[in-house]
Image: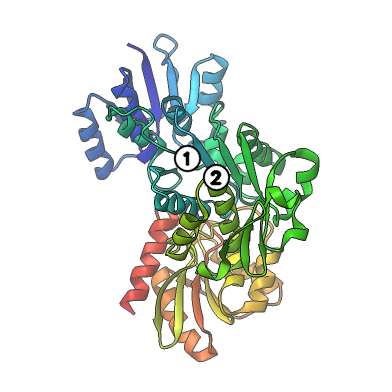
Protein backbone atom coordinates (compact mmCIF):
# COMPACT_ATOMS: atom_id res chain seq x y z
CA UNK A 1 0.00 0.00 0.00
CA UNK A 2 1.51 3.38 -0.99
CA UNK A 3 2.20 5.78 1.88
CA UNK A 4 1.34 9.49 1.96
CA UNK A 5 2.19 12.16 4.50
CA UNK A 6 -0.03 15.25 4.65
CA UNK A 7 1.32 18.39 6.38
CA UNK A 8 -1.24 20.68 8.00
CA UNK A 9 -4.48 19.85 9.80
CA UNK A 10 -6.58 22.62 8.28
CA UNK A 11 -9.58 22.06 6.04
CA UNK A 12 -7.48 21.39 2.94
CA UNK A 13 -5.16 18.96 4.76
CA UNK A 14 -8.07 16.96 6.17
CA UNK A 15 -9.71 16.83 2.73
CA UNK A 16 -6.47 15.64 1.12
CA UNK A 17 -6.03 12.93 3.76
CA UNK A 18 -9.61 11.68 3.32
CA UNK A 19 -9.26 11.60 -0.47
CA UNK A 20 -6.00 9.64 -0.33
CA UNK A 21 -7.45 7.18 2.19
CA UNK A 22 -10.46 6.67 -0.07
CA UNK A 23 -8.09 6.01 -2.98
CA UNK A 24 -6.26 3.24 -1.09
CA UNK A 25 -3.31 5.07 0.43
CA UNK A 26 -1.90 4.64 3.92
CA UNK A 27 -2.16 8.21 5.28
CA UNK A 28 -0.42 10.06 8.11
CA UNK A 29 -1.52 13.64 8.77
CA UNK A 30 0.75 15.84 10.88
CA UNK A 31 0.55 19.31 12.43
CA UNK A 32 2.90 21.23 14.73
CA UNK A 33 -0.03 22.59 16.71
CA UNK A 34 -1.96 20.80 19.46
CA UNK A 35 -5.30 21.83 20.97
CA UNK A 36 -8.52 20.25 22.18
CA UNK A 37 -10.29 20.99 18.89
CA UNK A 38 -7.42 19.39 16.96
CA UNK A 39 -7.52 16.36 19.27
CA UNK A 40 -11.21 15.96 18.46
CA UNK A 41 -10.33 16.01 14.75
CA UNK A 42 -7.61 13.47 15.50
CA UNK A 43 -10.17 11.13 17.12
CA UNK A 44 -12.62 11.57 14.24
CA UNK A 45 -9.99 10.80 11.59
CA UNK A 46 -8.69 7.79 13.55
CA UNK A 47 -12.13 6.23 13.11
CA UNK A 48 -11.59 6.55 9.34
CA UNK A 49 -8.20 4.87 9.54
CA UNK A 50 -6.14 8.06 9.21
CA UNK A 51 -3.27 8.55 11.68
CA UNK A 52 -2.93 12.12 12.99
CA UNK A 53 0.23 13.31 14.75
CA UNK A 54 -0.17 16.55 16.75
CA UNK A 55 2.69 18.68 18.07
CA UNK A 56 4.69 16.99 15.34
CA UNK A 57 7.38 18.31 13.02
CA UNK A 58 7.74 16.18 9.90
CA UNK A 59 11.15 14.67 9.17
CA UNK A 60 12.29 12.16 6.58
CA UNK A 61 13.15 8.69 7.89
CA UNK A 62 15.56 7.12 5.36
CA UNK A 63 14.22 3.63 6.10
CA UNK A 64 10.55 4.59 5.78
CA UNK A 65 10.13 7.28 3.14
CA UNK A 66 6.63 8.25 1.97
CA UNK A 67 5.68 7.90 -1.70
CA UNK A 68 3.82 11.21 -1.61
CA UNK A 69 3.91 14.39 0.48
CA UNK A 70 0.94 16.78 0.32
CA UNK A 71 1.43 20.29 1.67
CA UNK A 72 -1.31 22.59 2.95
CA UNK A 73 -1.18 26.19 1.59
CA UNK A 74 0.12 27.71 4.83
CA UNK A 75 3.28 25.56 4.84
CA UNK A 76 6.28 27.37 3.23
CA UNK A 77 7.49 25.56 0.13
CA UNK A 78 11.18 26.13 0.93
CA UNK A 79 11.41 24.60 4.41
CA UNK A 80 14.39 22.21 4.54
CA UNK A 81 12.40 18.97 4.80
CA UNK A 82 10.45 19.78 1.61
CA UNK A 83 13.62 20.79 -0.23
CA UNK A 84 15.19 17.49 0.87
CA UNK A 85 12.10 15.53 -0.21
CA UNK A 86 12.21 17.04 -3.69
CA UNK A 87 15.94 16.32 -3.93
CA UNK A 88 15.14 12.67 -3.14
CA UNK A 89 12.51 12.74 -5.95
CA UNK A 90 9.65 12.14 -3.52
CA UNK A 91 6.41 13.32 -5.15
CA UNK A 92 5.78 16.57 -3.23
CA UNK A 93 2.72 18.63 -4.14
CA UNK A 94 0.06 20.96 -2.74
CA UNK A 95 -3.52 20.04 -1.89
CA UNK A 96 -4.98 21.73 -4.95
CA UNK A 97 -2.60 19.84 -7.25
CA UNK A 98 -3.78 16.59 -5.64
CA UNK A 99 -7.39 17.59 -6.36
CA UNK A 100 -6.47 18.33 -9.99
CA UNK A 101 -5.21 14.77 -10.44
CA UNK A 102 -8.69 13.46 -9.64
CA UNK A 103 -10.80 16.24 -11.18
CA UNK A 104 -9.08 17.20 -14.43
CA UNK A 105 -11.82 15.59 -16.52
CA UNK A 106 -13.91 18.67 -15.62
CA UNK A 107 -12.93 22.09 -17.02
CA UNK A 108 -11.43 24.41 -14.41
CA UNK A 109 -11.58 28.19 -14.19
CA UNK A 110 -8.68 29.54 -12.13
CA UNK A 111 -8.62 33.02 -10.58
CA UNK A 112 -5.40 34.43 -9.16
CA UNK A 113 -3.97 37.87 -8.37
CA UNK A 114 -2.89 39.95 -5.40
CA UNK A 115 -6.31 41.51 -4.76
CA UNK A 116 -9.78 40.99 -6.20
CA UNK A 117 -9.67 37.19 -6.35
CA UNK A 118 -12.52 36.43 -3.98
CA UNK A 119 -15.02 38.93 -5.36
CA UNK A 120 -14.26 37.82 -8.93
CA UNK A 121 -14.54 34.15 -7.98
CA UNK A 122 -17.82 34.75 -6.15
CA UNK A 123 -19.27 36.66 -9.12
CA UNK A 124 -18.31 33.88 -11.53
CA UNK A 125 -19.77 31.19 -9.28
CA UNK A 126 -23.02 33.19 -9.02
CA UNK A 127 -23.25 33.60 -12.81
CA UNK A 128 -22.59 29.91 -13.46
CA UNK A 129 -25.19 28.92 -10.86
CA UNK A 130 -27.79 31.25 -12.41
CA UNK A 131 -27.03 29.64 -15.78
CA UNK A 132 -27.95 26.26 -14.27
CA UNK A 133 -24.41 24.88 -14.19
CA UNK A 134 -22.94 22.70 -11.45
CA UNK A 135 -19.84 24.82 -10.87
CA UNK A 136 -18.77 24.92 -7.21
CA UNK A 137 -16.25 27.46 -5.94
CA UNK A 138 -13.17 26.01 -4.23
CA UNK A 139 -9.60 26.79 -3.23
CA UNK A 140 -9.36 29.87 -1.05
CA UNK A 141 -13.17 30.09 -0.77
CA UNK A 142 -15.98 27.57 -0.70
CA UNK A 143 -14.81 23.98 -0.66
CA UNK A 144 -11.28 22.73 -0.24
CA UNK A 145 -10.51 21.43 -3.73
CA UNK A 146 -10.04 17.84 -2.48
CA UNK A 147 -13.52 17.95 -0.93
CA UNK A 148 -14.87 18.20 -4.48
CA UNK A 149 -12.87 15.15 -5.48
CA UNK A 150 -14.37 13.29 -2.51
CA UNK A 151 -17.87 14.35 -3.46
CA UNK A 152 -17.23 13.51 -7.09
CA UNK A 153 -15.99 10.00 -6.35
CA UNK A 154 -19.13 9.26 -4.34
CA UNK A 155 -21.42 9.71 -7.35
CA UNK A 156 -21.85 7.34 -10.25
CA UNK A 157 -21.99 10.20 -12.75
CA UNK A 158 -18.69 10.80 -14.46
CA UNK A 159 -17.73 14.45 -15.08
CA UNK A 160 -20.45 15.53 -12.66
CA UNK A 161 -19.08 19.09 -12.46
CA UNK A 162 -19.78 21.36 -15.42
CA UNK A 163 -16.97 23.62 -14.21
CA UNK A 164 -14.74 23.94 -11.17
CA UNK A 165 -14.24 27.59 -10.19
CA UNK A 166 -11.04 27.84 -8.16
CA UNK A 167 -9.57 30.83 -6.33
CA UNK A 168 -5.86 30.01 -6.35
CA UNK A 169 -3.23 31.83 -4.25
CA UNK A 170 0.48 32.05 -4.98
CA UNK A 171 1.03 29.57 -2.15
CA UNK A 172 -1.15 27.03 -3.96
CA UNK A 173 0.39 27.69 -7.38
CA UNK A 174 3.89 27.28 -5.95
CA UNK A 175 3.15 23.66 -5.08
CA UNK A 176 1.26 22.87 -8.32
CA UNK A 177 3.03 21.82 -11.50
CA UNK A 178 0.35 20.34 -13.76
CA UNK A 179 -2.78 22.26 -12.66
CA UNK A 180 -4.02 23.75 -15.94
CA UNK A 181 -7.38 25.55 -15.93
CA UNK A 182 -9.18 25.99 -19.23
CA UNK A 183 -9.73 29.69 -18.38
CA UNK A 184 -7.31 31.67 -16.19
CA UNK A 185 -7.88 35.15 -14.74
CA UNK A 186 -5.17 37.46 -13.38
CA UNK A 187 -6.90 40.14 -11.32
CA UNK A 188 -4.10 42.43 -10.05
CA UNK A 189 -0.40 42.34 -9.28
CA UNK A 190 1.24 44.37 -6.50
CA UNK A 191 3.92 43.50 -3.91
CA UNK A 192 2.58 41.02 -1.34
CA UNK A 193 3.71 37.84 0.46
CA UNK A 194 7.33 38.93 -0.02
CA UNK A 195 8.30 37.48 3.36
CA UNK A 196 7.54 34.10 1.77
CA UNK A 197 8.40 34.64 -1.91
CA UNK A 198 11.44 36.91 -1.24
CA UNK A 199 11.39 38.93 -4.49
CA UNK A 200 8.73 40.55 -6.66
CA UNK A 201 10.15 38.69 -9.67
CA UNK A 202 9.69 35.33 -7.94
CA UNK A 203 6.14 36.24 -6.88
CA UNK A 204 5.34 37.27 -10.47
CA UNK A 205 6.83 34.11 -11.97
CA UNK A 206 4.77 31.91 -9.63
CA UNK A 207 1.54 33.62 -10.74
CA UNK A 208 2.59 33.60 -14.40
CA UNK A 209 3.32 29.86 -14.35
CA UNK A 210 -0.37 29.11 -13.77
CA UNK A 211 -1.61 31.50 -16.47
CA UNK A 212 0.80 30.04 -19.02
CA UNK A 213 -0.84 26.63 -18.58
CA UNK A 214 -4.37 27.98 -19.24
CA UNK A 215 -6.06 27.75 -22.65
CA UNK A 216 -7.61 31.23 -22.32
CA UNK A 217 -6.23 34.12 -20.25
CA UNK A 218 -8.19 37.13 -18.98
CA UNK A 219 -6.13 40.05 -17.62
CA UNK A 220 -7.09 43.22 -15.76
CA UNK A 221 -6.12 45.88 -18.28
CA UNK A 222 -6.29 48.66 -15.67
CA UNK A 223 -3.60 47.13 -13.45
CA UNK A 224 -0.37 49.12 -14.02
CA UNK A 225 1.99 46.16 -13.62
CA UNK A 226 0.01 43.82 -15.85
CA UNK A 227 -0.27 46.54 -18.49
CA UNK A 228 3.50 47.12 -18.35
CA UNK A 229 4.31 43.47 -19.08
CA UNK A 230 1.24 42.68 -21.17
CA UNK A 231 2.31 43.59 -24.67
CA UNK A 232 5.82 42.15 -24.40
CA UNK A 233 5.20 38.97 -22.41
CA UNK A 234 1.62 37.94 -23.20
CA UNK A 235 0.00 37.38 -26.58
CA UNK A 236 -3.66 36.52 -27.34
CA UNK A 237 -4.83 37.67 -23.90
CA UNK A 238 -8.40 38.88 -23.32
CA UNK A 239 -8.11 42.31 -21.68
CA UNK A 240 -10.62 44.30 -19.62
CA UNK A 241 -10.90 48.00 -18.81
CA UNK A 242 -13.35 50.17 -16.88
CA UNK A 243 -11.86 53.13 -18.78
CA UNK A 244 -13.35 52.16 -22.13
CA UNK A 245 -12.46 50.65 -25.47
CA UNK A 246 -9.54 53.01 -26.13
CA UNK A 247 -7.64 51.65 -23.10
CA UNK A 248 -7.77 47.99 -24.16
CA UNK A 249 -4.49 46.23 -24.97
CA UNK A 250 -6.30 44.09 -27.54
CA UNK A 251 -8.81 44.59 -30.34
CA UNK A 252 -12.36 45.22 -29.02
CA UNK A 253 -13.47 41.81 -30.25
CA UNK A 254 -11.25 40.30 -27.53
CA UNK A 255 -11.97 42.92 -24.86
CA UNK A 256 -14.52 43.53 -22.12
CA UNK A 257 -15.03 47.17 -21.18
CA UNK A 258 -17.46 49.89 -20.13
CA UNK A 259 -19.05 52.04 -22.83
CA UNK A 260 -21.85 54.55 -22.22
CA UNK A 261 -22.57 52.94 -18.81
CA UNK A 262 -22.93 49.48 -20.37
CA UNK A 263 -20.76 46.39 -20.03
CA UNK A 264 -19.62 45.38 -23.49
CA UNK A 265 -17.95 42.00 -24.06
CA UNK A 266 -16.29 40.90 -27.30
CA UNK A 267 -18.25 43.54 -29.24
CA UNK A 268 -21.66 42.74 -27.72
CA UNK A 269 -23.70 44.73 -25.17
CA UNK A 270 -24.23 42.59 -22.05
CA UNK A 271 -25.93 44.70 -19.36
CA UNK A 272 -26.19 48.24 -17.96
CA UNK A 273 -23.55 48.63 -15.26
CA UNK A 274 -26.03 50.15 -12.78
CA UNK A 275 -27.42 46.61 -12.21
CA UNK A 276 -24.21 45.91 -10.26
CA UNK A 277 -24.50 47.18 -6.70
CA UNK A 278 -20.96 46.82 -5.28
CA UNK A 279 -19.08 50.09 -4.71
CA UNK A 280 -15.75 51.05 -6.23
CA UNK A 281 -14.14 51.02 -9.68
CA UNK A 282 -12.06 48.02 -8.58
CA UNK A 283 -15.28 46.04 -8.17
CA UNK A 284 -16.40 47.10 -11.63
CA UNK A 285 -13.09 45.71 -12.85
CA UNK A 286 -13.85 42.45 -11.03
CA UNK A 287 -17.24 42.45 -12.77
CA UNK A 288 -15.65 42.81 -16.22
CA UNK A 289 -13.30 39.88 -15.60
CA UNK A 290 -16.21 37.73 -14.41
CA UNK A 291 -18.22 38.64 -17.52
CA UNK A 292 -15.23 37.78 -19.73
CA UNK A 293 -14.94 34.35 -18.12
CA UNK A 294 -18.67 33.70 -18.38
CA UNK A 295 -18.77 34.58 -22.10
CA UNK A 296 -15.68 32.43 -22.78
CA UNK A 297 -17.53 29.58 -21.01
CA UNK A 298 -20.50 30.08 -23.34
CA UNK A 299 -22.97 31.55 -20.84
CA UNK A 300 -25.82 33.61 -22.26
CA UNK A 301 -25.94 37.32 -21.43
CA UNK A 302 -29.41 37.02 -19.86
CA UNK A 303 -28.06 34.71 -17.17
CA UNK A 304 -25.11 37.06 -16.62
CA UNK A 305 -27.35 40.12 -16.15
CA UNK A 306 -29.72 38.23 -13.84
CA UNK A 307 -26.88 36.97 -11.64
CA UNK A 308 -25.20 40.37 -11.39
CA UNK A 309 -28.44 42.21 -10.56
CA UNK A 310 -29.07 39.92 -7.58
CA UNK A 311 -25.45 39.56 -6.40
CA UNK A 312 -25.34 40.56 -2.70
CA UNK A 313 -21.62 41.23 -2.39
CA UNK A 314 -18.95 39.28 -0.55
CA UNK A 315 -18.44 39.08 3.24
CA UNK A 316 -15.38 40.98 4.54
CA UNK A 317 -14.92 42.93 1.29
CA UNK A 318 -16.48 46.37 1.75
CA UNK A 319 -19.39 44.54 3.40
CA UNK A 320 -22.09 46.90 4.69
CA UNK A 321 -22.93 45.90 8.29
CA UNK A 322 -25.36 48.50 9.67
CA UNK A 323 -26.15 52.19 10.01
CA UNK A 324 -26.09 53.85 13.44
CA UNK A 325 -27.14 57.50 13.74
CA UNK A 326 -26.53 58.03 10.02
CA UNK A 327 -23.08 56.39 10.12
CA UNK A 328 -22.36 53.32 7.97
CA UNK A 329 -20.22 50.55 9.49
CA UNK A 330 -18.32 48.69 6.75
CA UNK A 331 -16.26 45.50 7.08
CA UNK A 332 -13.25 45.30 4.74
CA UNK A 333 -11.30 42.77 6.82
CA UNK A 334 -10.00 41.09 3.64
CA UNK A 335 -7.87 44.19 2.98
CA UNK A 336 -4.73 42.50 4.31
CA UNK A 337 -2.16 44.67 2.49
CA UNK A 338 -1.59 48.35 1.75
CA UNK A 339 -2.96 48.25 -1.79
CA UNK A 340 -6.23 46.58 -0.81
CA UNK A 341 -6.67 48.97 2.12
CA UNK A 342 -6.02 51.98 -0.14
CA UNK A 343 -8.73 50.74 -2.52
CA UNK A 344 -11.12 50.17 0.39
CA UNK A 345 -10.66 53.67 1.79
CA UNK A 346 -11.02 55.20 -1.69
CA UNK A 347 -14.30 53.33 -2.25
CA UNK A 348 -16.31 54.62 0.73
CA UNK A 349 -17.79 58.05 1.49
CA UNK A 350 -15.32 60.46 3.02
CA UNK A 351 -14.42 61.60 5.56
CA UNK A 352 -14.25 58.16 7.19
CA UNK A 353 -13.07 56.81 10.53
CA UNK A 354 -10.54 54.10 9.64
CA UNK A 355 -9.70 51.08 11.82
CA UNK A 356 -6.32 49.62 10.81
CA UNK A 357 -3.62 47.34 12.18
CA UNK A 358 -2.85 43.72 12.88
CA UNK A 359 0.16 41.70 11.77
CA UNK A 360 2.09 43.96 9.40
CA UNK A 361 3.23 42.90 5.93
CA UNK A 362 6.03 44.17 3.74
CA UNK A 363 5.06 46.59 0.99
CA UNK A 364 4.93 50.22 -0.13
CA UNK A 365 2.56 52.22 2.08
CA UNK A 366 2.82 55.51 0.13
CA UNK A 367 -0.54 55.30 -1.66
CA UNK A 368 -2.30 54.10 1.49
CA UNK A 369 -0.90 56.97 3.60
CA UNK A 370 -1.93 59.46 0.91
CA UNK A 371 -5.47 58.03 0.89
CA UNK A 372 -5.60 58.39 4.69
CA UNK A 373 -4.50 62.03 4.48
CA UNK A 374 -7.15 62.72 1.81
CA UNK A 375 -10.08 60.70 3.14
CA UNK A 376 -9.75 59.74 6.84
CA UNK A 377 -11.06 62.00 9.60
CA UNK A 378 -9.24 59.78 12.11
CA UNK A 379 -7.40 56.45 12.26
CA UNK A 380 -7.83 53.97 15.12
CA UNK A 381 -4.87 51.59 15.39
CA UNK A 382 -5.11 48.04 16.73
CA UNK A 383 -2.86 45.02 17.04
CA UNK A 384 0.88 44.47 16.75
CA UNK A 385 1.35 46.96 13.91
CA UNK A 386 -0.22 49.88 15.80
CA UNK A 387 3.03 51.52 17.09
CA UNK A 388 4.74 51.22 13.69
CA UNK A 389 1.69 52.58 11.87
CA UNK A 390 1.56 55.49 14.33
CA UNK A 391 5.17 56.33 13.47
CA UNK A 392 4.43 56.10 9.72
CA UNK A 393 1.44 58.44 10.04
CA UNK A 394 3.39 60.86 12.27
CA UNK A 395 6.25 60.97 9.76
CA UNK A 396 3.79 61.84 6.98
CA UNK A 397 2.40 64.76 8.98
CA UNK A 398 -0.90 63.05 9.81
CA UNK A 399 -1.68 63.30 13.51
CA UNK A 400 -5.37 62.38 13.87
CA UNK A 401 -4.71 58.81 15.07
CA UNK A 402 -5.20 56.92 18.31
CA UNK A 403 -3.73 53.63 19.55
CA UNK A 404 -6.78 51.74 20.86
CA UNK A 405 -5.28 48.20 20.88
CA UNK A 406 -8.42 46.05 20.46
CA UNK A 407 -11.36 45.80 18.08
CA UNK A 408 -13.81 46.33 20.97
CA UNK A 409 -12.21 49.69 21.76
CA UNK A 410 -11.98 50.63 18.08
CA UNK A 411 -15.67 50.08 17.29
CA UNK A 412 -16.89 52.04 20.33
CA UNK A 413 -14.41 54.88 19.76
CA UNK A 414 -15.20 54.84 16.03
CA UNK A 415 -18.83 55.71 16.69
CA UNK A 416 -17.87 58.51 19.09
CA UNK A 417 -15.38 60.05 16.66
CA UNK A 418 -17.71 59.75 13.68
CA UNK A 419 -20.32 61.77 15.55
CA UNK A 420 -17.73 64.36 16.64
CA UNK A 421 -16.12 64.78 13.22
CA UNK A 422 -19.17 64.44 10.99
CA UNK A 423 -17.86 61.24 9.35
CA UNK A 424 -20.33 59.12 7.40
CA UNK A 425 -18.44 55.81 7.64
CA UNK A 426 -16.57 53.70 10.18
CA UNK A 427 -14.41 51.40 8.04
CA UNK A 428 -12.42 48.34 9.13
CA UNK A 429 -9.75 48.07 6.43
CA UNK A 430 -6.68 46.84 8.32
CA UNK A 431 -3.83 46.77 5.73
CA UNK A 432 -2.54 43.81 7.78
CA UNK A 433 -2.83 40.09 8.27
CA UNK A 434 -4.96 39.04 11.22
CA UNK A 435 -2.85 36.43 12.96
CA UNK A 436 -1.71 38.59 15.88
CA UNK A 437 -5.23 38.58 17.39
CA UNK A 438 -7.39 36.34 15.19
CA UNK A 439 -7.40 32.97 13.44
CA UNK A 440 -8.13 34.50 10.02
CA UNK A 441 -9.38 37.66 8.32
CA UNK A 442 -12.88 36.09 8.43
CA UNK A 443 -12.62 35.66 12.21
CA UNK A 444 -11.57 39.34 12.49
CA UNK A 445 -14.40 40.52 10.25
CA UNK A 446 -16.98 38.41 12.09
CA UNK A 447 -15.88 39.96 15.40
CA UNK A 448 -16.17 43.47 13.91
CA UNK A 449 -19.68 42.64 12.62
CA UNK A 450 -20.72 41.28 16.01
CA UNK A 451 -19.45 44.39 17.84
CA UNK A 452 -21.17 46.75 15.38
CA UNK A 453 -24.50 44.97 15.73
CA UNK A 454 -24.17 45.11 19.53
CA UNK A 455 -23.93 48.91 19.30
Colour mapping used in the image? rainbow
- Quadrant of the drawing holding the N terminus: top left
In the image, 414 versus 351, the foreground residue is: 351
In the image, 445 versus 55, the foreground residue is: 445
**Which type of secondary structure does the marked residue at label 1 adopt?**
loop
Residue at left offset 50%, top offset 73%: 427
Q: Earlier in the sequence, mark 1 or mark 2?
A: 1
Q: Is residue 197 above or below residue 380?
A: above
Q: Is residue 331 above or below residue 352?
A: above
The image position of residue 234, as x and y in percent, is: 74, 39
The image position of residue 70, as x and y in percent, is: 44, 27
The image position of residue 46, as x and y in percent, is: 22, 28
Query: Which image quadrant for residue 281?
Result: bottom right
Q: Which residue is mark 2?
A: 111
- Quadrant of the drawing holding the C terminus: bottom left
Which disc, if any, is residue 140? none
Q: Which residue is mark 1?
A: 74
Q: Is residue 55 visible?
A: no
The image position of residue 431, as x and y in percent, is: 56, 61
Residue at left offset 54%, top offset 14%: 89
Amino acid sequence: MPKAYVIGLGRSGVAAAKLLKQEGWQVILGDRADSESLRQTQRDLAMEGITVKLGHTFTLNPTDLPNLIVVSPGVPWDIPVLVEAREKSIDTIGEIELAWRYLKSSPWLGITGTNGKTTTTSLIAAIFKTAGLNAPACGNIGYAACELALKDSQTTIQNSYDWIVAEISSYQIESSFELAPKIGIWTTFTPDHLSRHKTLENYYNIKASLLKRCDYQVFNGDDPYLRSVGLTQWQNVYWTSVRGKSKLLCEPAKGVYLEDSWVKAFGELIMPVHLFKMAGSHNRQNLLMAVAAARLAGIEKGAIAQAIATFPGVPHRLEYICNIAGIDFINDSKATNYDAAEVGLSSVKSPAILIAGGEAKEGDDTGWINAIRDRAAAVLLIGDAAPAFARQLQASGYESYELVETMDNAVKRGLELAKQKGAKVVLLSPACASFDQYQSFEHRGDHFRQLCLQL
